[in-house]
Image (tube, rainbow, N blue to C red):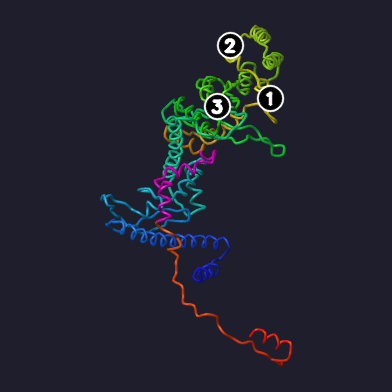
Amino acid sequence: MDNIISKLYEIIKESSDLIATEESIQLYMYEVFTELLGDIFIHVNQTIKEQKQQEGWKVKREDWKTVQFIFGPVRYRRTLMADQENQNHYPLDEWLGIRKYQRHSPLVEVKVAELASKCTYRDTAETLKEWTAVAMSHQTVGSLLKRVGEAQAREDEEMVIELEESAALPGGKKVDYFYAEADGVFVRGTTKKKSLEVHHALVYEGWQKNGKRVSLKEPKAIMTTKKTAGFWAEVQAFTATHYALQHAQIITNSDGGPGYTADKFQETFSQSNYPVLNQLDAYHIFQGLNRAFGVQSNLFKQNIHQALKKHDLEALTIWLDTYESTLEETQAVEKLASFRTYLLRNWDRIFDWREKVEQVPKDARGLGAMESNQRHISFRMKKRGMHWSEVGCEAMVKVKQGILNQTLREAYLHQQTRSTRQQRKVKQTVRVSSLMHQKTRQSVGAKKGTIPLYAPHSSAMGQLIKSFR
């Protein structure tokens, strides 16, 4: 500690301004941290090696390895050992949870993925270089994001497999009402004139107020570029794992497009004892209305809107026919015909779910949160000339999903080679207290002394000293 204080004093004295002082101190602290952590790893390696030797493992050689941590590269020595079956191991790396050929710490990999989900790979690399001791290329940023995203994807796949193999539904949280919305977002692929569809589902328990602001209660997202069947399998596995929906009323919302029809919701939430309510998304109805009648308000548009609100098919047909008779352009007629077909095909789904249930929950609101939540995908993955490979697109949306659901780090660590069982074994193998243990010095007992008295023994101070004897 004295050496660190002396070094800091020297840096402050030699620096010309406070900015240079802080930068120099930061670099120095990075050096101190990396050196100390490297020494600790070497001590841990020695402890593990001795125990493995007692178990019959043989030492083959000593190697050096460098791992990039958030505060700098840590270089340490590890031992290559052969077990009783002559299989090679680096016990220290297994204890730390470091994969073979891994060059970045778990925190660095997860932080890079989280940052890359919000800005470009190049911006991520520049930000890391400016604010941390991590320096890497934008290609490395992309590789790390794919690795972390694949961990979340494997976690979701295992959840689906576990549900398929289980004999009964897992117990989860019980709710009276459960809400689900689904839609797709298309992003540009690397193949010319080919897009990739990101399937996106949003599930939540209702709404909650914070002052005047209303937000979704316990919102969770499921995103993937898999085919429709794989997407709905993940939605079903996620909801069945976290919720017990047997006695819950399910209310769903979608635009009715391919892959997001009412039967998909019914099949996915078939565990509920009640029929699944599926309404047509109001945003897409309004979008179709503007496409057919224009954005400006007019008599036809207002009356058609009222017919939809009252669910009056006869009035809707009259106003559509009347408006069609005023059209002269073929393109306008085609737009109106497309809108009419869309409404008639989904007529039974045009309703407000609050009019379909017997007891409307307190603070119930209309559905339609999906469109605003699509920005998590569109803001990062669309425009600006971006093109995505299938692997990169899946990894990105899985990282997005993990961040929104707060499961990314847990999924990443679970997919590392260090399992829960290994972690328990690790705690038994190496105890930090044994590494930091210092031999105690022999006690010399209590030291003797006297209190000088500069007054008569008969005085008050003299009497007090006598009481101590």
Residue 191 position within the rendered picture, expressed as x and y whole percent measured from the top left: 41, 28
Gap between marks 2 and 1, in whole Å? 38 Å
Disc 1 designates what residue?
Answer: 359
- In this view of the protein, which residue sits in the foreground, 319 or 359? 359
Residue at 45 percent across and 69 percent down: it is: 438
Q: Which residues are magenta?
A: 402-428
Quadrant containing the C terminus in the rendered view: bottom right
Q: Is residue 226 left or right of residue 257?
A: left
Q: As displayed, is residue 436 above or below residue 325?
A: below
Closer to the N terminus: mark 1 or mark 3? 3
Instruction: Report the predominant secondary structure element of the magenta stretch.
Output: helix
Image x and y of residue 188, in percent = 47, 29
Is 415 contained in the magenta span?
yes
Q: Is residue 172 magenta?
A: no
Q: Which mark is residue 326?
A: none
Compared with residue 308, is residue 43 higher up or lower down, i.e. above or below?
below
Which amino acid type is shown beneath numbered disc 3? Ala
The residue where tag 2 is placed is 337
Q: Secondary structure at mark 1?
A: loop
